[in-house]
């Protein structure tokens, strides 16, 4: 008997190969579509996005990351991410804290993190990081996102300063309250030390009131009758 495949068997194999090729082409088209969508999302994101592999080497990053950290183009395009890491560290206001937190996350790949990073130019970034893990549990790397919260922080600082100013102003406000021990004849007021003050002096000490002195018509007629006569 001949071991050569029959015409029908060859025809079946060809159909199977065509099906496999078609499935591969379809999978490749789907991959290209997903890749294009991912690149579009990265490019249009208002957040900086950086993805690194399991060894901490950058796989991809969007333009927003470059803009936020003011990374020179020759550094951003360099496959060696060492210069970029050094540049980012030099941009932070507290490089030691930045390095400490970043190192901790790389040595604890399963952990997520969210903190704030302030740059030397005053920019404040909300930094979020999470591991990239496959369905099988395999660790592939880490994703970092950077959201500019500078305006929000400035508003919060202004609000806190306003609250402090209001609290200070309220603490400086003097109030007159309760009963005033006042003499029924001379109208002096007894102070907290037991001494008697002129009423305007007492009120000035216990409030922000200022006095200007004049003479009412009745007192003018009583104490200076000659001036009253002259006016007539």
Image (cartoon, grey):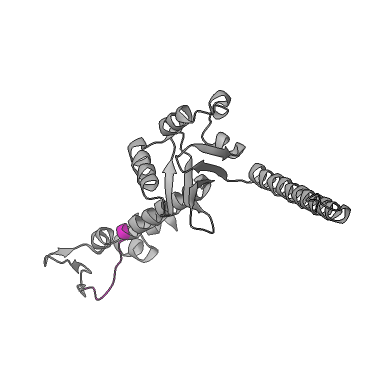
Verify whether residue 67 appears in magenta.
Answer: no
Q: Horizontal and vertical percent for residue 218?
A: 36, 66
Label total for image: 0
Magenta region, residue range:
171-180
Verify whether residue 172 appears in magenta.
Answer: yes
What's the residue at 23%, 62% (across, down)?
202
Residue 201 in which image quadrant: bottom left
Side of 103 where 30 appears, left or right: right
Q: Classify 86 as above or below 17.
A: above
Q: Nearer the viewer, residue 215 or 149?
A: 149
Side of 166 where 196 appears, left or right: left
User: Given the current orientation, which residue lies at the most extreme front position?
Assistant: 1
Side of 151 where 226 appears, left or right: left
Q: Nearer the viewer, residue 204 or 159?
A: 159
Q: Quadrant of the N terminus?
A: bottom right
Q: Nearer the viewer, residue 76 or 34?
A: 34
Residue 200 in sight from this viewpoint: yes
User: Given the current orientation, which residue lies at the most extreme right position?
Assistant: 7
Q: Horizontal and vertical percent for residue 42?
A: 63, 44
Q: Horizontal and vertical percent for residue 48?
A: 56, 43
Q: Quadrant of the C terminus?
A: bottom left
Q: Main secondary structure of the magenta part?
A: loop
Q: Horizontal and vertical percent for residue 18?
A: 82, 50
Residue 214 in sight from this viewpoint: no
Q: Classify 110 as above or below 96.
A: below
What's the residue at 56%, 44% (across, down)?
49
Q: Classify 228 as above or below 60.
A: below
User: Given the current orientation, which residue lies at the most extreme top position?
Assistant: 74
């Amino acid at each position: 008997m001949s071991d050569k495949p029959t015409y029908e068997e060859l025809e079946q194999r060809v159909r199977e190969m065509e099906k496999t090729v078609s499935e591969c082409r379809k999978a490749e088209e789907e991959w290209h579509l997903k890749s294009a969508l991912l690149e579009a999302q990265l490019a249009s994101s208002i957040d900086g996005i950086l993805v690194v592999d399991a060894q901490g080497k950058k796989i991809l990053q969007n333009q927003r990351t470059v803009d936020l950290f003011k990374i020179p183009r020759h550094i951003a395009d360099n496959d060696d991410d060492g210069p970029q890491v050094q540049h980012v560290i030099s941009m932070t206001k507290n490089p030691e804290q930045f390095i400490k937190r970043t190192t901790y996350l790389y040595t604890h790949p399963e952990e997520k993190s969210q903190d704030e990073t302030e740059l030397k130019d005053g920019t404040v970034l909300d930094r979020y990081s999470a591991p990239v893990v496959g369905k099988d549990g395999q660790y592939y790397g880490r994703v970092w996102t950077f959201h500019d919260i500078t305006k929000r922080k400035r508003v919060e600082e202004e609000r806190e300063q306003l609250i402090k100013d209001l609290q200070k102003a309220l603490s400086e406000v003097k109030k007159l309250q309760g009963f005033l021990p006042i003499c029924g004849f001379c109208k002096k007021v007894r102070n907290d030390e037991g001494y008697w003050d002129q009423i305007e002096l007492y009120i000035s000490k216990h409030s922000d009131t200022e006095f200007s002195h004049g003479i009412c018509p009745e007192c003018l007629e009583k104490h200076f009758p000659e001036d009253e006569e002259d006016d007539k």
